[in-house]
Image (cartoon, rainbow, N blue to C red):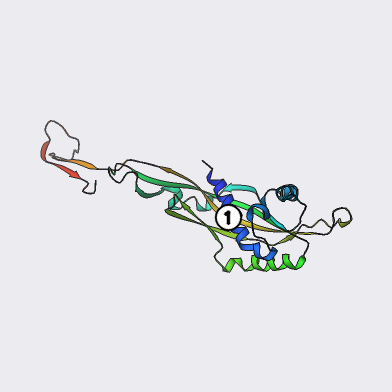
């Protein structure tokens, strides 16, 4: 089973490719995008394609950190009851809990055309106005919305063109408010047994002198 961090990485890869593929005339994520550090991205992409071609996108997650600002949210503190683990017995709930993390991604645009990179840059700048979030469905039933924050683009082109030729590389940072998800199945209350006692005086302890007034059995009608 893949970790939830890897699931978020895969989601970001697909989201970034869908957002920017048209600006670089790309069609296939597997051969047009690579998840790798900038230093090795071009080599890894060339091995995928079997040719040294500059036009592509790379993405990498250099770090992640626990997010204290969202630790007091209900999802992180108490979790959330989704449904019964077994609808026939209703003996346990599926309880979803999460740890908030901040994941920093670097998206790199690689191209010999500066115009294409500027078009992608404009789309990156306007992304804040067009649903800047990654939505993952946990167990195909619980949507998790993870919001993104954007920073300034940085020109990281190696202008030593006499050795490596002319191609442009721009880095676009994305900060994702992610979650690491886990689930458990705590038991549910199916039957409650209630005894009502009466004591003389302020004591609440049940003794031999306590008087049992009534006994009740309360059954969960949905079970």
Residue 105 vs residue 101, the one in the foreground: 105
Which of the 4 quarters of the picture holds residue 119?
bottom right
Q: Quadrant of the C terminus?
A: top left
Residue 98 image offset from top left, x and y in percent: 47, 47
Residue 17 vs residue 204, the one in the foreground: 17
Would you place residue 211 above or below residue 32 in this image?
above
Please, what secondary structure does the residue beneath circle 1 have?
Answer: strand
Which of the 4 quarters of the picture holds residue 12?
bottom right
Instruction: List the residue tagged with mark 1.
Output: 176
Which of the 4 quarters of the picture holds residue 174?
bottom right
Left or right of 51, for residue 188: left
Left or right of 141, for residue 167: right
**Other residues around mark 1 within 10 Å, as few (<14) / some (14–19) / many (≥20):** many
Residue 84 image offset from top left, x and y in percent: 33, 46
Residue 178 image offset from top left, x and y in percent: 54, 52
Residue 198 vs residue 32, the one in the foreground: 32
Would you place residue 30 above or below residue 214 in this image?
below
Left or right of 69, for residue 150: right
Would you place residue 67 above or below residue 115 in this image?
above
Q: Residue at x 42, y 53 (%)?
A: 141
Q: Residue furthest right?
A: 162
Q: Residue furthest front?
A: 50
- Count of picture labels: 1
Residue 211 image offset from top left, x and y in percent: 10, 37
Q: Residue at x 50, y 53 (%)?
A: 70
């Amino acid at each position: 089973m893949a970790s939830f961090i890897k699931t978020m990485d895969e989601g970001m890869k697909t989201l970034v490719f869908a957002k920017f593929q048209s600006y670089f005339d790309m069609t296939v994520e597997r051969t047009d995008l690579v998840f790798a550090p900038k230093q090795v991205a071009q080599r890894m992409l060339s091995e995928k394609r079997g040719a040294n071609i500059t036009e592509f996108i790379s993405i990498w997650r250099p770090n992640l950190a626990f997010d204290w600002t969202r630790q007091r949210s209900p999802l992180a503190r108490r979790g959330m009851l989704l449904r019964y683990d077994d609808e026939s017995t209703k003996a346990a709930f599926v309880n979803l809990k999460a740890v908030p993390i901040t994941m920093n991604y670097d998206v790199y645009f690689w191209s010999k055309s500066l115009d294409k990179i500027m078009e992608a840059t404009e789309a990156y700048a306007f992304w804040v106005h067009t649903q800047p979030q990654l939505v993952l469905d946990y167990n195909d039933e619980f949507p998790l919305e993870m919001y993104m924050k954007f920073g300034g683009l940085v020109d990281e082109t190696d202008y030593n063109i006499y050795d490596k030729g002319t191609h442009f590389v721009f880095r676009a940072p994305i900060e994702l408010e992610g979650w690491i998800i886990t689930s458990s199945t705590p038991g549910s209350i199916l039957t409650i047994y209630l005894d009502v006692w009466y004591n003389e005086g302020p004591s609440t302890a049940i003794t031999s002198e306590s008087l049992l007034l009534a006994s009740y059995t309360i059954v969960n009608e949905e079970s």
